[in-house]
Image: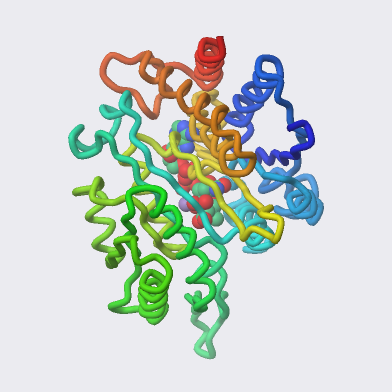
Amino acid sequence: TANKKILVLPGDGIGPEVMREVRRIIEWMDRRRHVSFAMEEGQVGGAALEATGSPCPDETVERALGADAVLFGSVGGPRWDSLPFEKRPELGILRLRKELGLFANLRPALVMEPLVDASSLKPDVVRGLDLMIVRESTGGIYFGEPRGIETLPNGKRRGVDTEVYTEEEIARVARVAFDLAKKRSGRLTSVEKANVMQTGRLWRAVVSEIGKAEYPEVELSHMYADNCAMQLCARPKQFDVVLAGNLFGDLLSDLAAALTGSLGMLPSATLGAPDASGRRHALYEPIHGSAPDIAGKGIANPCAQMLSFAMLLRWSFGMEEDAAMIETAVEKVLAGGLRTADIMGPGTARVGTSVMGDAVLRELDKLAA
Ligand code: NAD
Ligand code: IPM
Ligand code: MN
């Protein structure tokens, strides 16, 4: 595996703090499992803006294109909130998704048993929850043209965003979702607002056609996005794989995160299309942001970043055993009662980011023994 190249982009806020704990896992793997990777570190977000004038320098894009996988932290912060759009740190992640062709964003929401009490919902509503949101991530209203803020002849301003989806864009992400549904429970819920949006009408039609023609064994249902948000809160366990466009998928995945206890727990993988040799670009990141309210305090939950690394091992390198080991270690630490502030429950002890990291390494030691 030493020839496997990982580009690490810690970014801003808590990004570097939680990435540090992943680095310790990587060092542990080198020491204890004799697997090593070719690691590189690059700049993105506000940090890159300060250093180079761009939130996503060309050099970072080129290195990402050349890597076997990208491990991303988070970008953004109040310091840069009033900058023009092209300078905003968030452009860092948006440009990487676009340039690497990362159209399928997989966002699992898994309730680990020890965290059942950390959810704001009743234990029986969330116990055992295991759903996967497949979010389209290079199209829709995030990228559609025209967009911008313009001044009208009457001197008043007008903001414009455009939701556009082509049939191909819908079809390729739908196939990712159908393939996952086939491997899981065989159920897929496709989400849009076909009752009010033209992109929603096309989305529903294309997903239905693909289901009928290519995945007759998958049980497909359609749901309006507003109802889906409500159903996720009321009866989340009815869902297995949920397919949505860029904006609805963004909203629904933060909502699903809250079901699991905290944004600080959830990883994600963003995948491109495989080439002829089966190689595909892929980026792994927690679904949370740079958490400016707690950055620099050493209290961020590193689990989402660690679990994103586990997803990287599984999806990009086929290292199922190592991925599962990290996931088990995290769950054992939580079961032992150590918690960061965001996931406190009855009878648990509050610890900071690095103590959480220490505890995960201890569990890994036990698992490897
Ligand atoms: P956020 O996800 O950064 O934070 C939301 C809330 O969750 C905060 O209260 C935060 O403290 C908490 N939280 C998030 N991650 C946590 C963790 N690991 N441990 C403990 N608590 C955690 O969202 P926001 O506050 O809306 O956005 C802050 C900045 O991050 C903005 O600039 C936004 O654009 C950016 N952002 C970036 C990404 C990304 O890089 N992929 C994702 C979302 C938001
Ligand atoms: C996410 C974030 C990003 C998004 C922002 C930071 C551009 O919220 O990854 O969920 O909206 O896609
Ligand atoms: Mn988001």
Q: Position of residue 321 (x, y in %)?
A: 55, 28
Q: Position of residue 85 (x, y in %)?
A: 62, 63
| 366 w.r.t. 279: above or below | above
Q: Position of residue 299 (x, y in %)?
A: 49, 24
Which residue is more in the foreground, 80 or 125? 125
Picture residue at 33% right of the left edge, 35% below the top: 111
Name which quarter of the figure residue 39 lies in: top right
Picture residue at 52% right of the left edge, 26% below the top: 326
Picture residue at 54% right of the left edge, 68% below the top: 139
Name which quarter of the figure residue 250 lies in: bottom left
Residue 355 seen in this snapshot:
no
Is 83 left or right of 223, judged from the image as shown? right
| 319 w.r.t. 99: above or below | above
| 42 w.r.t. 231: above or below | above
Residue 294 seen in this snapshot:
yes
Q: Indicate the quadrant containing the N terminus: top left, top right, bottom left or bottom right.
A: top right
Which residue is more in the foreground, 290 or 93? 93
